[in-house]
Structure formats: C-alpha cells, structure tokens
Image: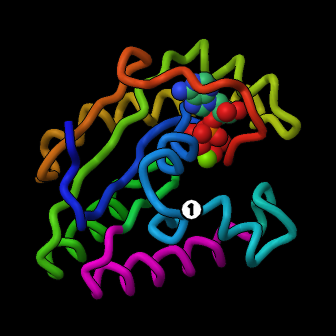
Amino acid sequence: MPLPDPALVVLVGASGSGKSTWASRHYRAAEIVSSDQLRGVVGSGEHDLDASTDAFALLEQVVAARLGRRLTTVVDTLGTDAPRRRRWLAAARGAGLPGVAVVLDTPAGVCRSRNAARDRPVPARALERQLASVAATTDLLAGEGWDAVLVLTPDDLPTYLPTAGPR
Ligand code: ATP
Ligand code: MG
C-alpha cells in the first residue's frame, strides 16, 4: 500500500520490532526523527536514558518545525504515548498533511530474540512492558482519526540480512 507523501508517519513497535530498519528502507535520513538518535545527540549515546527528557523536547521541536513546512516526517519512537500521538496528528492536520500510523506487528518472540542478540539489550521486563503497551496502542489507533493505520506483519516485511543496521 503506497503511503501518502508528504505525510506524518508515526511508527509504533516494541524494541527490535524493526521500526528503524523499516524507516531507513522507505525514507531519507532527514525525514526520520528518532528518539534514540536524539539521545545520542544530547546524551552520551542512544541508550542514555538520562537524556530522554532533552531528547524528546528536541524531537517535539523537530517534528513541529518539519510539519509546519509540510515536510514528510517519520517519528521513530515506541509510539505508545497517546498524548504525543494526538499532538503530532493535530500538527499534521494543522499543516494540511495526512497522518499515518505504521505498526510493526512483529511477533513477541522475534522481538525478544533480536533484543537478546543485541550489544545493549533492553531489560527483559522492560521489553515485556513495551510489548503490552504496543498491543494496547494498536487497539486504540482505529479510534484516533488517522488517515491510515498500516499494520505490518512479518509477511509484509522483506527479510533483511542481518547487518549492522540502524537502531
Ligand atoms: P529499537 O526500538 O530498539 O530502536 P527497532 O524497532 O528500531 O528497535 P530495528 O533496530 O530496526 O528495530 O531492528 C532490530 C534488529 O532486527 C536489527 O538487528 C535489524 O537488523 C533486525 N531487523 C529489523 N527488521 C528486520 C527484517 N525485516 N528482517 C530481518 N531482520 C530485521
Ligand atoms: Mg530503532
């Protein structure tokens, strides 16, 4: 399914579900606004959770500025924060852009094994919380007014060779 462009694209998925990989296959780097990447900009690295508040403040600013210029903006976060989703969608609408939610509906077992294989895995209990909140979010999306909600299952995703891919 071709997505509208320009558009707001909000990714939803647990750690290891493939959000950053999918985004990098479909969008230019400048179009992707990633909370992990911004932690690396304002903190000691992508995993510096102490830098989250600053990283998200910056993310909100970048998203608002890009949407205000009617530029395609792919928001690469967990996507499970409903007030943030509402704000981003309102900003897109204000700029006359459609808003699309893209759920990386990757099986929990795949996320767990990808996570376990990482250098810096998310703690197992944190990943379980993420998986539960992604499932709850998926149920909410239909009622949030998105122009499209795309739920990508493994059948929709090409299998990429394991590489040092984006995170
Ligand atoms: P995080 O929330 O931690 O940023 P993420 O959802 O962005 O995670 P990715 O970093 O894109 O997930 O992918 C996690 C791992 O899974 C990476 O090693 C990546 O190469 C691999 N991966 C992602 N998508 C696929 C795919 N379709 N086929 C095979 N491997 C994949
Ligand atoms: Mg990522």
- Residue at the spot of label 1: 34
Chosen colour scheme? rainbow
What residue is shown at x 65% (from left), y 78% (from top)?
54
Q: Secondary structure at mark 1?
A: strand
Magenta stretch secondary structure, dominant: helix
Give the vertical position of 11 relative to 88 (above or below): above
Could you tell me if residue 21 is visible in this image?
A: yes
Q: Which residues are magenta?
A: 51-72
Up/down of 106 relative to 140, above or below: above
Compared across the picture, whether 47 is left or right of 71 comes to right
Quarter of the rendering occupied by the N terminus:
top left
Q: Nearer the viewer, residue 107 or 162?
A: 162
Q: Residue 108 falls in which quadrant of the image?
A: top right
Classify residue 27 as left or right of residue 116: left
Q: Position of residue 36 (x, y in %)?
A: 66, 59
- Pick the front one: 12 or 50: 12
Q: Nearer the viewer, residue 39 or 74?
A: 74
Q: Quarter of the picture for ligand 1?
A: top right
Amino acid at circle 1: Ser
At a point 36% along the width and 54% down the height, the residue shown is 10
Left or right, 127 with respect to 145, comes to right
Q: Above or below — where is 21 with respect to 72?
A: above
Task: Specify the quadrant of the image occupied by residue 115.
Answer: top right
> Quadrant of residue 163 in the image?
top right
Image location (x, y in percent) of residue 25: 49, 45
Number of other residues with Cα within 10 Å of mark 1, as a class: few under 14, some 14 to 19, many 20 or more: many
Residue at x 44% of width, y 60% of height: 75
User: In the image, is residue 52 part of the stretch drawn in magenta?
Assistant: yes
Q: Is the CB of the residue bearing disc 1 within 8 angstroms of ligand 2?
A: yes
From the top left corner, tell me how far across and down residue 152 is, in percent: 35, 28
Q: Residue at x 67, y 24 (%)?
A: 161
Residue 73: image location, x then y, percent: 37, 67
